[in-house]
Image: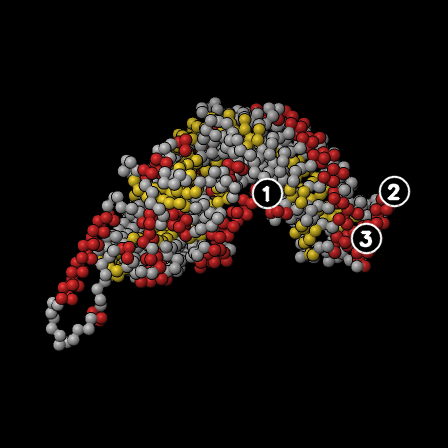
């Protein structure tokens, strides 16, 4: 109470002194600081020196003036471990010029008394969990030169909110303005253009809409402007380069800007960083971009820029004049066509990143690309490049990432790739490469991931490849022409999580040394020529979550040591020569949800517990010696064991009436079994998936979508298309997801999504109505899933409205802040259910705005479980406790460059 009276007295005295025109006493400054301290708790040592035994001018973080040596002019407590509100008492520090409380755990709003400090020049409250709206009273800080309130969104509803006050324009001395990463809405005030001394504007990561105010083009002093990651639209002024000729940094990425990049931008001779990625800019780029000789970053990806011939590519060629250039990114522009100019070989040796993936480039990769000796990341994927991989790539000794996948490259892989000892990601999948895998790849001791699938590579797998024992995480050699055996050295890869070699011509036995790969999660050796038995050492792989050995020539029994693989989720052993009984331990593995043992020589009783309780989760067709199991199998009953037959030694062996009845029943069971087997093998047999949901045919779905007419197309993704449909049976409007079975991995995505959705039920998850696994009118396989229709489509369409097919913008309103928060809560509840309430837990693996659907009440529903992962609880817990990183799956959206966070 005494402290409160003292503080109140100090406050009243200071107020009276100001009113009377006299200078408040130094005691008022000390009282204000002590009150500020009293309302905080400190997790550090920053405030330990704040006591009355010493002068407050010597306290940590406190500075006093020269002309007024007992008046506080600066408070610097960044990263001080402060927790609590900002006390209004700081408003009594009338001589305060600089206040920095960044990187603390403050809460509440900015007191209007603090915003009224008329001598304040520097205000930094960034990353401090500040909430509420931006105080209008900041307009009274006429000396204010820098405002930094960015990064206050980590507590969600406690973020800086509201709009940028137009009255802020009264702070005429402002030189720096930063509201990075908050929840600010509305437009950029026209009044910001009145700050004649403003040189720094940072507004990225908010929800600003509208266009760039014309008044900002009058700020000739402007050096830095960043508005990335908002909802701004419109074009850039044709005069931007003449009016803002001093610009050094432009970040416009992740908005909805349209139009061309004005040619006048090349007048900004000091421009250092230019990022306009993830917008809807179009047209041809200024051909003399090379005039920007100071440029270090050039990023134009995910737009609609055009280049059809060599003249259109002059902009790229001219960039070779930029001797400081470090990062060039032109990916995901579908209208960038033709050949990559040979001039790429003349780029600066300072170049570290070159990304040209996802365009429509053709021709060969320029041989001179090996001149870029400073390159660390080279991305050329998803184009139409032909020819061979240049031998010169082996000169890029600093290279860490190399993506060549999804092209038409041919020829052999150059041995010089073994020189890239810094390389940790190499992807050359989906090409037409042939010849052997270079043994020199065994030198890449930093390699974590090697993707070489879907080529024509032949020869043996070099044993040197398995010398990469420390870091290698994934080897994907699927669908090549590889021969020989799987080297014994595979056991050296003790940290490998994924080994995929399906669809080759590998033979011999599966090496026992695989058991040394203790963290292996997915093993796919199907569609080869392996022989012998399944090695019992697989029981050592405690983390195995997928095992696919289908279509080989394996023989012998299923080893009981598989029971040690506690995390096993999927077991595929079909099309082998396995014999013996189905091990009973399989029914005791609680994590196991899919088993395929079909077309072997198994015999004996089929288990009836665990995974064998649900006919849609296992397949045993093609094993003539099986009996028993659940009723839906219609297998013959298993005969009694000899120990159960209590024949007397003196009883003669007679063919009695009960014996005849037994053989009659056995014969009848065999006939029923064979008839059922023929039905199962018939092309018209229904999928086991149909037993989960109401049956629906291809023809009913075709009719309900007008023959899958484009007018009913809702959206399109990697694995297929979604149509709006009206079912005849009840008039219900639904969404039909039709899978493109020509796409690799699509069938597995269908099964994964069906399996996952059959396990879950929550108001914020999309509801599956039925599914169809049949044939179309041409006799081709057809798979589709029917969902509840979501009239408000995806969250992505509300956040980033795209151009419709007719070229006009969708007529769609932006969602309010309240709706955004409700959607975030809906998604959080769905994820909590999947991770914590499902048994076993489900990981979505592809969460993004386009996979969040909105119903008529704007309630969010998480959809698209094609990449979902169902984890046993033990693995879920171990992942939660682990500090190791887990690789990302699915799509990656716009991420602003790291520079804007500095």
Q: Position of residue 672 (x, y in %)?
A: 20, 54
Residue at mark 2 to residue at mark 1: CA–CA distance: 46 Å
Give neighbour class at mark 1: few <14, some 14-19, many 20+ (Cα, 10 Å).
Answer: few
Callout 2–callout 3 Cβ contact below 8 Å? no
> Mark 3 and mark 1: span between their CA atoms?
39 Å
Q: Residue furthest bottom?
A: 650
Q: Earlier in the sequence, mark 2 or mark 3?
A: 3
Residue 690 can be seen, yes or no: yes
Disc 3 designates what residue?
8
Which image quadrant is residue 253 in? top right
Residue displayed at 63% across by 40% down? 184
Query: Residue at coordinates 13% horizontally, 66% vertically from top-left?
Result: 657
Viewed as shown, does residue 661 lie left or right of 452?
A: left
Foreground: 483 or 258? 258
Residue annotated with mark 2: 21
Q: Quadrant of residue 118?
A: top right
- Tell me where residue 716 appears, x and y as whole percent: 42, 36
Q: Looking at this rendering, what residue extends furthest in the front direction?
A: 730
Does residue 352 appear left or right of residue 361 in this picture?
A: right
Q: Nearer the viewer, mark 2 or mark 3?
A: 3
Residue 818's label in the rendered image is 1
Q: Is residue 444 visible?
A: no
Q: Secondary structure at mark 1?
A: helix
Camera-nearest residue between 637 and 34: 637
For the point 68% across and 41% down, the residue is 134
Q: Nearer the viewer, mark 3 or mark 1?
A: 1
């Amino acid at each position: 109470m005494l402290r409160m009276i003292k503080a109140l007295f100090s406050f009243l005295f200071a107020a009276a002194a100001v009113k009377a025109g006299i200078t408040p006493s130094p005691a008022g400054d000390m009282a204000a600081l002590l009150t500020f301290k009293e309302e905080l708790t400190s997790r550090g040592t920053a405030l330990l020196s704040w006591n009355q035994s010493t002068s407050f001018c010597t306290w940590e973080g406190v500075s006093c003036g020269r002309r007024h040596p007992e008046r506080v002019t600066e408070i610097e407590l960044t990263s001080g471990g402060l927790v609590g509100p900002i006390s209004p008492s700081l408003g009594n520090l009338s001589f305060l010029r600089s206040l920095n409380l960044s990187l603390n755990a403050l809460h509440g709003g900015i007191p209007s008394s603090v915003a009224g400090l008329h001598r304040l020049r520097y205000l930094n409250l960034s990353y401090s969990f500040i909430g509420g709206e931006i105080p209008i009273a900041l307009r009274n800080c006429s000396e204010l030169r820098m405002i930094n309130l960015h990064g206050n969104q980590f507590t969600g509803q406690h973020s800086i909110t509201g709009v940028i006050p137009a009255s802020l324009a009264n702070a005429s001395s402002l030189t720096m303005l930063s509201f990075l990463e908050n929840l600010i809405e509305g437009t950029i005030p026209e009044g910001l253009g009145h700050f004649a001394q403003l040189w720094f504007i940072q507004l990225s990561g908010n929800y600003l809409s509208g266009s760039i105010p014309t008044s900002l083009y009058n700020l000739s002093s402007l050096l830095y402007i960043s508005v990335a990651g908002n909802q701004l639209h419109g074009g850039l002024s044709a005069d931007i380069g003449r009016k803002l000729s001093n610009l050094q940094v432009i970040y416009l990425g992740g908005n909805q800007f349209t139009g061309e990049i004005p040619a006048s931008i090349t007048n900004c001779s000091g421009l250092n960083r230019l990022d306009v990625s993830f917008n809807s800019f179009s047209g041809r780029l200024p051909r003399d971009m090379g005039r920007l000789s100071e440029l270090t970053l050039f990023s134009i990806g995910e737009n609609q820029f055009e280049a059809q011939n060599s003249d259109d590519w002059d902009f790229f060629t001219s960039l070779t004049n930029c001797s400081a250039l470090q990062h060039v990114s032109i990916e995901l522009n579908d209208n960038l066509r033709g050949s990559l100019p040979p001039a790429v070989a003349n780029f600066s040796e300072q170049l570290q990143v070159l990304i040209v993936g996802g365009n429509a480039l053709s021709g060969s990769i320029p041989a001179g690309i090996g001149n870029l000796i400073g390159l660390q990341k080279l991305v050329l994927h998803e184009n139409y490049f032909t020819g061979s991989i240049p031998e010169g790539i082996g000169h890029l000794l600093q290279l860490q990432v190399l993506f060549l996948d999804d092209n038409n490259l041919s020829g052999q892989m150059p041995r010089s790739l073994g020189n890239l000892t810094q390389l940790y990601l190499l992807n050359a999948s989906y090409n037409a490469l042939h010849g052997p895998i270079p043994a020199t790849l065994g030198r890449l001791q930093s390699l974590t991931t090697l993707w070489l699938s879907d080529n024509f590579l032949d020869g043996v797998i070099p044993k040197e490849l398995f010398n990469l024992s420390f870091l290698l995480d994934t080897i994907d050699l699927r669908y090549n022409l590889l021969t020989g055996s799987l080297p014994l050295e595979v056991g050296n890869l003790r940290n490998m999580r994924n080994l995929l070699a399906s669809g080759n011509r590998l033979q011999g036995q599966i090496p026992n040394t695989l058991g040394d790969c203790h963290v292996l999660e997915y093993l796919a050796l199907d569609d080869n020529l392996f022989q012998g038995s399944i090695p019992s050492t697989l029981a050592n792989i405690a983390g195995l979550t997928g095992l696919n050995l289908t279509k080989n020539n394996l023989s012998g029994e299923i080893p009981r040591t598989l029971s040690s693989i506690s995390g096993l989720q999927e077991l595929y052993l079909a099309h082998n020569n396995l014999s013996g009984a189905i091990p009973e331990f399989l029914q005791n593995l609680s994590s196991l949800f899919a088993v395929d043992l079909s077309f072997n020589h198994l015999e004996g009783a089929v288990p009836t517990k665990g995974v064998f309780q649900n006919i849609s989760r296992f397949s045993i067709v093609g094993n003539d010696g099986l009996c028993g199991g659940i009723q839906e199998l219609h297998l013959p009953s298993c005969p009694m064991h000899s120990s159960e037959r209590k024949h007397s030694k003196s009883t003669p062996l007679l063919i009695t009436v009960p014996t005849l009845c037994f053989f009659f029943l056995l014969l009848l069971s065999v006939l029923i079994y064979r008839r059922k087997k023929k039905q199962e093998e018939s092309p018209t047999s229904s999928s086991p998936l149909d037993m989960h949901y109401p049956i629906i045919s291809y023809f009913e779905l075709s009719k309900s979508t007008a023959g899958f007419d484009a007018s009913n197309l809702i959206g399109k993704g990697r694995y297929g298309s979604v149509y709006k449909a009206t079912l005849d049976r009840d008039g219900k409007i639904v969404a039909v997801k039709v899978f493109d079975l020509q796409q690799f991995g699509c069938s597995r995505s269908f099964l994964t999504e069906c399996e996952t959705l059959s396990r879950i039920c929550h108001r914020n998850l999309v509801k599956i109505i039925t599914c169809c696994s049949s044939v179309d009118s041409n006799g081709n396989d057809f798979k589709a899933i029917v969902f509840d229709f979501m009239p408000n489509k995806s969250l992505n369409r509300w956040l980033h409205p795209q151009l419709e097919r007719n070229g006009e913008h969708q007529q769609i309103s932006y969602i309010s802040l309240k709706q955004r928060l409700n959607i975030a809560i809906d998604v959080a509840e769905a994820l909590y259910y999947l991770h914590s309430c499902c048994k076993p837990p489900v990981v979505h693996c592809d969460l993004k705005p386009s996979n969040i659907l909105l119903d008529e009440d704007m309630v969010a529903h998480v959809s698209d479980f094609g990449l979902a992962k169902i984890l046993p609880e033990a693995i879920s817990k171990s992942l939660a406790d682990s500090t190791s990183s887990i690789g990302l799956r699915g799509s990656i959206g716009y991420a602003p460059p790291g520079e804007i966070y500095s």
